[in-house]
Amino acid sequence: MKQAGRQAPNDTSAARPASNENYLLISAFSASSQSPLVAISKRISECGCNLAEARVSTLGGELSVLALAQGAWDAIAKLENALGRLDRDGELRLTHFRTGARQQQSNLLPYVVEVVAADKPGVLFQLAEFFAQQGITIEQLHSTRYRAMQTGADMFSAQITIGIPSSMHIAALRDDFLEFCDGLNLDAIMDPMKF
């Protein structure tokens, strides 16, 4: 018989997560001549973990890698030690910390937003603020500045993936967004993501 406030030895109601449900988020930067992806993915593999997700991009003169490693608790601990040694070598700038699995949100509809405009300070902030005020999450974002070939004007471009709550009226949101963009003189589209 189980006493109040105590858990019986065979009671599995408070079971631990499955052994491979441990995650380590890794951020690495290095000079663009040498990709940190090779070094990071090698350590992940050697420690018995899986590379669940990865993003690679060049920002300025640096190549950046965001990687999500998944594995057993002891394999993740081994990976943390291996990354510590790699960081001390000085070739990469590394940060890492434990995280959890991404929670699926089936009530969010994936939409893609593309914006092009003359570059001016604060454009990205204003876009992010618009979506935040609507309760819309930004899932992915890629923005850049470039010089227009024909005119030499400084331009801004952004591709944004957003999650719109399914309860939201899409046509009204699109109208509000396009009106917002017109007020800032931004050329923009908002379309459902096509898989």
Image (cartoon, rainbow, N blue to C red):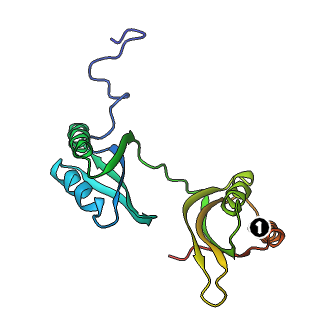
* Residue in front for this viewpoint, 185 or 172: 185
Q: Position of residue 58 (x, y in %)?
A: 42, 66
* Residue in front for this viewpoint, 6 or 77: 77
**Above or below — where is 54 with respect to 181?**
above
Q: Position of residue 195 (x, y in %)?
A: 50, 76
Disc 1 packing (10 Å; few <14; some 14–19; many ≥20): some
Q: Position of residue 76 (x, y in %)?
A: 25, 41
The image quadrant that residue 129 belongs to is: bottom right
**Left or right position of 143 against 167:** left
The image quadrant that residue 130 belongs to is: bottom right
The image quadrant that residue 134 belongs to is: bottom right
**Above or below — where is 154 with respect to 78?**
below
Q: Position of residue 18 (x, y in %)?
A: 30, 41
Residue at figure coordinates x 21%, y 41% from the top left: 85
Residue situated furthest bottom in the rendering: 150
**Above or below — where is 180 with respect to 50?**
below
* Residue in front for this viewpoint, 60 or 188: 60
For mark 1, give the secondary structure.
helix
Residue at figure coordinates x 70%, y 59% from the top left: 122
**Circle 1 sits on which residue?**
177
Residue situated furthest front in the rendering: 152
**Left or right position of 173 against 147:** right
Say which amino acid is labelled 1: Phe
